[in-house]
Amino acid sequence: MDAGTELIAVFDEAGTVVGAAPRAEVYARSLWHASAGVILRSTDGRRVYVHRRADDKLVMAGLWDCVAGGVVDPGETPLETATRELAEELGVSRVALRLLLATAWESGPGPGVGGTALIGEAGLRCHLFGYEAFSDGPVRHQPSEVAEGRWMTHAGLAALLADPARPFAPDSRVLAEHFLATHP
């Protein structure tokens, strides 16, 4: 299925599900939607798994990220989305997830995020649900989602976020910065 025709849940500004629409329409019309994702931590809590998004993703292609995640499908809860995405993108399943942050996020106006031309003039409008999980792997990348990845210390993640030569997915930055502020 073409990712642009995939139906995703549409929310209102307050965070209530109000329907569903094709992904391309949600992005082009800057409709509120939700995404959920997971920061994968090593079992000793000292490292996080960081990856670079595949170069042909619909949004934020090629950007660095520390969240295995995606949009909430119709009829799916954010926890179900996060669990599904962790298994799909990194091959990690049967681990407990704990909510770290739930917040509304807007990318603002512009030509798109990460060079994507599909984003409407108002930018992306998304309710973000961020979780954490603990596992030492193995990590198995889904090639259509992840180009490369590796474990990093918290200091390494902070350095990556500060490096303009390695652009970071802006919605995941919200969760990464919250994580680093609450998990020094």
Image (cartoon, rainbow, N blue to C red):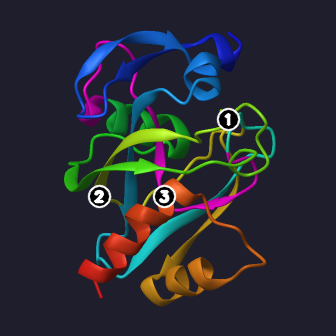
> Residue 176's quadrant in the figure?
bottom left
- 85 relative position to 140: left or right: left
Specify which label sits upstream in the sequence, 3 or 1: 1
Picture coordinates of residue 111, whole percent (x, y): 76, 45
- Between circles 2 and 1, the one closer to the viewer is 1
Quarter placement of the C terminus: bottom left
Q: How far is mark 3 from mark 1, CA to CA?
A: 17 Å
In the picture shown, does residue 147 fall above or below 155? above
Closer to us: 95 or 183 = 183
Q: Which of marks 2 and 3 is in front?
A: 3
Name the residue that disc number 1 marks: 119
Pointer 2 and pointer 1: residues touching (CB < 8 Å)? no
User: What range is drawn magenta here?
Assistant: 60-80
- The local secondary structure at tag 3 comes to helix
Q: Tag on residue 132? A: 2
* Residue that label 3 marks: 172
Q: Tell me what residue is drawn at x 66 percent, y 19 percent.
A: 3
Amino acid at pointer 2? Glu
Name the element at disc 1.
Answer: loop
Which amino acid, by three-letter code, is at mark 1?
Ile
